Image (tube, rainbow, N blue to C red):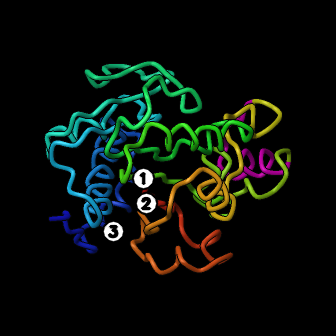
């Protein structure tokens, strides 16, 4: 059975993480909490017990830890720079060159990663995820649509403007220094729901559902154009 999300408690956690996520271990705790959100979303379609899972761009592997603990998954974390104390089954690698054979995984995860991959490598990365997913397996990809306030990372909410203007406004109002001369210098690349849908269809996946991972207002993810502005993070649940 999918894990049920208590919306009142969920919103309280969102507010807490908004103001406290970089204090102590809260960033790690936040990622582990969103691993439970993933379980709730995906288990509407596939039971995750004892499944083989690949987390593409999983940082230190917090999602793998929760999936292994809660569902006894054989979870592998793939990241080019895993950071400190990574998950025990962590492999160094990139999304556009996944070092596994075809049809290996019941579920492939890619959460909050594509916006940090150069534009020309985003679609090859989705193609690679399709390749390593088992037949009738699933993929869970989350993006922050570019025109939503949440998408700009260190430049938000001004990232919808040209970089120089975004940099000026961010430094003026938030007093934090932004390095570089472009969004690309800050490892940030534009991605939209419309482009995601096109790349997904180009590479063989079928979209079985979309989810609002933050506000849980899932119907907003189904409204073209509107979804680009109102949903902080859209999860695409895909089937091969």
Labels 1 & 3 near each other (Cβ < 8 A): no
Q: Position of residue 29 (x, y in %)?
A: 28, 43
The correct choice, above or below, for 50 with respect to 59 in the image is below
Query: Which residue position holds label 2?
Result: 237
For mark 3, does the 10 Å Cα neighbourhood hold few (<14), some (14 to 19), or many (20 or more) residues? some
The secondary element bearing badge 2 is classed as strand
The secondary element bearing badge 1 is classed as strand
Tell which of 112 and 164 is nearer to you: 112
Q: Give the label on residue 140, or none.
A: 1
The correct choice, above or below, for 1 with respect to 69 in the image is below
**Nearest to viewer (mark 1 / mark 3):** 1
For mark 2, does the 10 Å Cα neighbourhood hold few (<14), some (14 to 19), or many (20 or more) residues? many
Which segment did they paint magenta? 165-179
Tell which circle, 1 or 2, labels the residue nearer the N-terminal end: 1
Q: Give the label on residue 65, or none.
A: none
Q: Position of residue 119 (x, y in %)?
A: 72, 41
Q: Measuring 52% from the left and 73% from the top, which residue is drawn there? A: 221
Labels 1 & 2 near each other (Cβ < 8 A): yes
Tell which of 51 and 186 is nearer to you: 51
Q: Main secondary structure of the magenta part?
A: helix
């Amino acid at each position: 059975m999918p894990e049920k999300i208590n919306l009142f408690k969920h919103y309280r956690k969102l507010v807490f993480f908004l103001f406290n996520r970089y204090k102590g271990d809260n960033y790690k705790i936040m990622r582990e909490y969103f691993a439970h959100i993933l379980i709730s979303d995906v288990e509407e379609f596939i039971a995750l017990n004892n499944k083989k899972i690949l987390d593409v761009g999983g940082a230190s592997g917090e999602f793998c830890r929760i999936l292994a603990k809660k569902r006894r998954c054989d979870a592998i974390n793939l990241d080019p720079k895993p950071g400190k104390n990574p998950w025990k089954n962590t492999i160094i690698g990139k999304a556009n060159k996944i070092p596994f054979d075809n049809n290996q995984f019941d579920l492939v995860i890619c959460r909050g990663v594509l916006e940090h991959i150069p534009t020309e490598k985003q679609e090859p990365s989705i193609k690679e995820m399709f390749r390593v997913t088992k037949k009738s397996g699933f993929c869970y990809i989350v993006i922050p649509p570019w025109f939503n306030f949440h998408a700009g990372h260190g430049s938000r909410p001004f990232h919808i403007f040209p970089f120089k203007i975004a940099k000026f406004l961010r430094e003026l109002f938030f007093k934090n220094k932004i390095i570089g001369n472009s969004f690309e210098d800050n490892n940030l690349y534009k991605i939209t729901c419309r482009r995601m849908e096109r790349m997904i269809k180009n590479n063989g996946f079928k979209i079985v559902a979309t989810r609002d991972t933050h506000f849980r207002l899932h119907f907003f993810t189904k409204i073209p154009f509107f979804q680009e502005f109102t949903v902080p993070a859209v999860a695409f649940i895909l089937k091969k």
